[in-house]
Image (spheres, grey):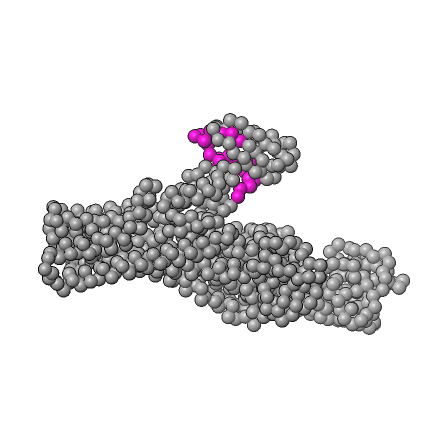
Amino acid sequence: MKQASLRVSGMTCAMCVQTIERALAKMDGVVSVRVNPANETAAVEYDDRKIEVKDLQQAITEAGYGVVNERAVLKVGGMTCATCVATIENALRSKEGSIDVKVNLGTEKAYVTYNPSILSIPEMKRAIEETGYQYLGLEGEETEELEKAAREMDLRQKRTRFVVGFAVSIPLMLMMYLNVKLPFPNAYFMLITSTPAFVYVSHPIFMAAYWALRNKNLNMDVMYSMGIGVAYISSLLGTFEIVLTKDFLFFEAALMLASFLTFGRYLEARAKGKTSEAIKKLMGLQPKTATIMHDSEEKTLPIEDVRVEDIVLVKPGERIPVDGVVIAGASFVDESMITGEPIPAEKKTRSNVVGGTINKNGVLTIRATKIGKDTALAQIIRLVETAQGSKPPVQRIADRVVSYFIPVVLTIAFVTFLVWYLVLSNTLLFALTRLISVLVIACPCALGLATPTAVTVGIGRGAELGILIKNGEALELSEKLTTVVFDKTGTLTKGRPAVTDLVTVGITEDDLLQAAASLEKKSLHPIAEAIVDRAEQQNVVLADVEDLDTIEGKGVTGRLDGKTILVGSALLLEDNDIEYPQEIKERALETEKEGKSVIYVASNGKLCGLVGVADTLKDNAAIAVKELQKMKLEVTMITGDNERAAAAIAEKIGIDKTLASVLPHDKANEVKRLQEHGKLVAFVGDGINDAPALAQADVGIAIGSGTDVAIESGEVILMKDDVLDAAAAIQLGRKVMSRIKQNLFWAFAYNTALIPVAAGLLHPFFGITFRPELAGFAMAMSSVTVVTLSLLLRRYTPAARKQRL
């Protein structure tokens, strides 16, 4: 019997307790259930032969509640290929209390969701080490130096091994080719010379194969060990002429093959270390200390000791240590590392500042509002790491292929040997050479590295550009999109309307503004605020209003200096039977055609003027639309404005299709309607106001979120309030997917083209064969090629970014 304590969310009353208890109690294998609503836990005693913790969680979820688990990111050393990933995933998944496991070969991390009441970090550490890999600590712990030291030592050992291997094998190979005669048999000399080097170089390969077989896995090391093992044992038998003759001397080939594999893994490890450079840069932005003002004295404290509400002093050239609000001083702050915006932002009293950014020229006194893991920088790092650990659906193809790859290659190798030796009656030497060549040329590593390295580098590059991509699925969907829907207000426009036209009938502009602004001054509507702002700019004194009344969707009425004033739409005038001249109607129509909103002002039953209000377009809106249209995407604008106003804005920026008069809560329905017509939709809007539409879209792009990366809606978060970055995000996604496909193509092409050549398929026609040494070199280079192609993404700048005004 086992016991599990599950943390349950969503319980509100005693009925919830009963519901959960009933849902768990009816499961086969559950012995007892106790649900505590006070600490929101469910204590379950169960028979682990009949049921698992995952099943208990599923029952709670299906009952309508949530289960709160913990998540750990474990750093793992020693992984080389996709089968290593499978080995570690299986080892961690087999642990009771493990809910979900994803291992990323590119970042060399294991992302584990687990129940802490059943499974502990030391148990996970033991599981990793028992499979033959290194546990390098938890992400977030002060293990960076340990991790760095372990990686440097690993690289140093690999370098020493391949240098020793080549230093011995190359002279031996030259001796063979030049037919150098020694005073004693060459075979004994080669045996004595190569054996110590072979044991030293190949020891890690054989050990990795041993651990894989012990864990019932077939991986790259098993296959390679068989190849170099067959070569060495054949040489040993040939030397002493036991069964085989002295023709079967592969000492230099066995050593060179082991050296090539080690050399390839050395280059691969060096390149893989660079895939996570973006995240390392972000981590490097976190200051280690902060200067605190305490009783008018400056104190330097470790960053861990800073508390919310502490007063922090930041001098010119220093990094701001925490998120906060400026309470004294003024300066310019370089926020490029967070938002991608190269121009420093001005900061003064009441301005918000972000930890990790650089204070340029003035002294700032800041009140800390967020510290530690709650800062924007910490959230960005967490989001990027999670995204880098995600697997886009395309990776499932590679994973499926890798699971069958090694058994298929082993079959090909032994069939090759049997066909050449028994069917085609070729020499044993030739058949054995073909067997070794097939075993050492096949490379599942390239397939395993193709996707995770590109995802890691691509998402890291996005973070550098201020484009945060939450998961690998968003990358894959970016190339399949057919439609991009923009919310108008605050996305394509600045979201801050301004008065553009004042048309008076029998009164002055100041009188018109006084009447309109006096009635609108208590309203929070953006148009009302625009009218009040214009009145203040013209120093118009606002008067007190009596009998103020709001008519929903139409406007406001009130009494001002004994006169009845109406401010609102044409409908408000119609309801009050107010007539106005034809030329005013025509002027209002022209104003609306320009995409402006028209506000009518009437006094004592007579029209006294019009106020034209418009929201100005963002600088890069038209360029962004053009960039998306270049990608053959259909661009649509959605707005609550009437058809005329919407058409005017759309025409200015080159959008052909508009969805006008859409209420805020109907935006998600409009997105759904497009999806029902077979469209794959990206929605670009505000991360909070447009949350339902962002969630409904296939790819939600939350724009201008600044440092608020905690928002749930949207698969992509744009740090900067620039609509051009929406196009840049899609271009980046397409580039990453293109690179993944290139990587997979080369990985598949390499194996499908060279395995038959190694098996001797071209020998009967052209006399072409692959020597085992060349096969080993080709194998080593395949993984390096894939990682190098992924690393090229570090220099990629989306075309839209180059168009920025």
Tell me if residue 687 can be seen.
no
Q: Residue at x 81, y 61 (%)?
A: 519
Q: Residue furthest right?
A: 562
Q: Residue at x 83, y 57 (%)?
A: 548
Give how far across and how far down residue 542 sits, in percent: 83, 66
Q: Residue at x 26, y 49 (%)?
A: 225
Give how far across and how far down residue 725 sits, in percent: 54, 64
Q: Nearer the viewer, residue 574 or 650?
A: 650
Quadrant housing the C terminus: bottom right
Where 510 falls versus 679 (above or below)? below
Magenta residues, as a range? 44-70
Give how far across and how far down residue 313 sits, in percent: 65, 63
* Residue 348 in the figure: left or right of residue 803: right
Q: Residue at x 37, y 55 (%)?
A: 154
Give how far across and how far down residue 562 sits, in percent: 89, 62
Looking at the image, how many numbered discs can be counted on the residues? 0
Residue 125: say if magenta. no
